[in-house]
Amino acid sequence: MMKFLSITAMSLLLAAPVLAQSVPDKDKDKDPNPSAVNRAAEVEQRIDRQQDRVTDDLQKDRISAAQAAEDQAKLNKIQGHLADDTAMSGGGITSAQQQNLNRQLNATNSLLTSQRRH
């Protein structure tokens, strides 16, 4: 029994530096990866452009006010997802998160194109 306790204690002592290194650093969240921030900015730009497009289409009577409200709600939902993702990671998003948001924006873009009255 004593030999087992000694081995266990020794393995804990040897593993302590490794365990200490694997604990996430809270300061990492405060200074996100620049490319992660760029990805978030690119998605934000796409959302802004689509919101401008909805406003423009409404002003030019290409879509109804009800349709503009629906489109804006969809874009607001995507913007909420972006805000949630950036809040969790401290200001940036992963490439997988960007791909997911871009898929949603692609679908919204297709919808905006198809619903226009010419």
Image (spheres, rainbow, N blue to C red):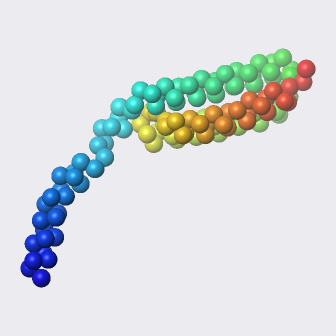
Tag count: 0
| Residue visible at 12% across and 75% down in the picture | 5
| Horizontal arrangement in the rendering, residue 81 relative to residue 11 (left or right) | right
| Residue visible at 56% across and 35% down in the picture | 98
What is the quadrant of the C terminus in the image?
top right
Q: Position of residue 66 (x, y in %)?
A: 83, 34
Looking at this view, is 55 or 99 the one in front? 99
Q: Position of residue 95 (x, y in %)?
A: 52, 36
Residue 111 showing in the rendered view: yes
Quadrant for residue 108, please give it: top right
What is the quadrant of the N terminus in the image?
bottom left
Q: Position of residue 49 (x, y in %)?
A: 67, 22
Q: Position of residue 94 (x, y in %)?
A: 49, 37
| Residue visible at 86% across and 25% down in the picture | 116
| Residue visible at 81% across and 18% down in the picture | 59
Q: Is residue 86 above or below residue 22?
A: above
Q: Is residue 62 above or below residue 28?
A: above
Q: Is residue 81 above or below residue 12?
A: above
| Horizontal arrangement in the rendering, residue 18 relative to residue 80 (left or right) | left
Looking at this view, is 26 or 60 the one in front? 26
